[in-house]
Image: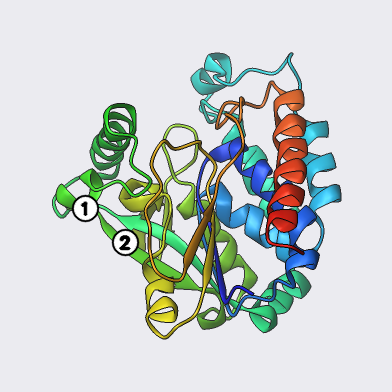
Amino acid sequence: MFDAVVFAGGGNRCYWQGGFYEAAAHRLGLAPARVVGASAGGFAAVYSLLGIGPETRARVIGACDPQLKNFDFAAWRRGEPLCPVGPLYTELLHQTIDATAFHRLQQMTDFQVAVARLPRGLSPSLGAAIGIGAYQLEKKIFHPVHPRFGRAIGFRPEFVSARALTDPQLFREAMMASSGVPPFMPVTHVSGQPAFDGGLVDNVPVDPVESIEAAGGRTLVLLTRVYKSIPVVRGRTYAQPSRKVDVGQFDIRNPDGIRNAYELGLKDGDAFASALGR
C-alpha cells in the first residue's frame, strides 16, 4: 500500500510512532522500499522494522524514574555530561543495533537517517544554538509541518544510507548525530565532520521520498505533533496523533508519559488501518 515511510522527529513523542506502526503495519501490509527517519523517529523506525518494539519500550520505561535528574549539575561539575539522556541513549543504541540487527535493516529496506550540517563558519556550539532557536521560534509562531528557517539560515540536509555503511558503529553514530541537540545529546561526527539533529533542517524529512512519489509511489508520513494544517501532496499520506502527545522530548523522569504515547499510537494506528478498510 505504501512504498516509503517517513518517521518524523520528536524525542519521546516518537513512541507514539512505535505504537502506531505496531498496530497498523501488518494490517496495511507495510514493506516499504525506503524508510527515512529524523532524530528519535529514526530510532522508532529501527525497532519497529525489527519487530522489537515491546522489549525496547520495556527497557526504556525501566530506565526512566521520577527520581532521576534531566539536568545533573553535580555530574557536570565532575566533568560528566550535563544531561544523562545522552549516555542513556548511547547505551540504548548499542543494545538495539548490533551487527545482526544492522544487517537485517540493510536487507529489509533502504534506510536513510536525516542529519543536518551547520552553516559555514559557525562553531558546533554556536551553530546548534542558532539552529535550535530558529526551529523552536518557527514551530511556536507558524506551526509548519515542514519548517523553512533552518534552510534559510544555511543549515544543509544530509541523508546517511544504512546500505552505504559497512559497520554498525557507523550507523549508530549516524543515529546519534541525527538526535544531536546539545546539551541533551553529544556532538557526533559523520564522515569526519560534526553532524546534528536532522530536525534543524526539517524534522519531517521527506526529501528522499520525493523521487518515489514522482514515479507514482506512495508515502506514509508519521508525525509526532498535532497540526492545524497538513500539506496536500500527491502520493503522500500524513498520519498524526489524535491528541497532543504529552511527554517531554528528552524527559527521563516520566515513564508513564512514554507508556501513554505508545498506547495512544496503538489506538491511532488501529483506527487508521480501519479507516482504510484493512
* Mark drawn on residue 85: none
Residue, x 61% and y 26% (percent of image)?
247
Instruction: Give the residue at x 65% y 48%.
Output: 17
Using the image, tell me which numbered label, if any, was put on residue 157.
Answer: 2
Image quadrant occupied by the N terminus: bottom right
Which residue is label 1 attached to? 151
Quadrant in which residue 267 is drawn: top right
The span from disc 2 to disc 1 (Cα, nearest Å) is: 8 Å
Q: Is residue 99 above or below residue 139?
A: below
- Does 41 appear above or below 108? above
Q: Position of residue 68 (x, y in %)?
A: 70, 18
Say what amino acid the circle numbered 2 marks: Pro
Which amino acid, by three-letter code, is at mark 1?
A: Arg
- Left or right of 206? Residue 256 is right
Disc 1 is placed on an element classified as helix
The quadrant of the picture occupied by the C terminus is bottom right
Are dots 2 and 1 in contact, CB under 8 Å? yes
* Relative image position of residue 171 (x, y in whole percent): 57, 67
Tell me if I can see residue 21 in this picture.
Answer: no
Of the pair 252 and 146, the residue shown nearer to us: 146
Sequence-earlier tag: 2 or 1: 1
Is residue 112 at all visible to an observer of this figure? yes
Which colouring convention does the figure follow?
rainbow
Which residue is found at the position 34% from the left and 55% from the top?
116
Nearest the camera: 271 or 84?
271
- Count of numbered circles in the view: 2
Q: Residues within 10 Å of mark 2 (few under 14, many from 20)?
A: many
Image quarter of residue 4:
bottom right
| Secondary structure of the residue carrying numbered label 2 | strand
> With 223 as the anchor, is 62 left or right in this view?
right
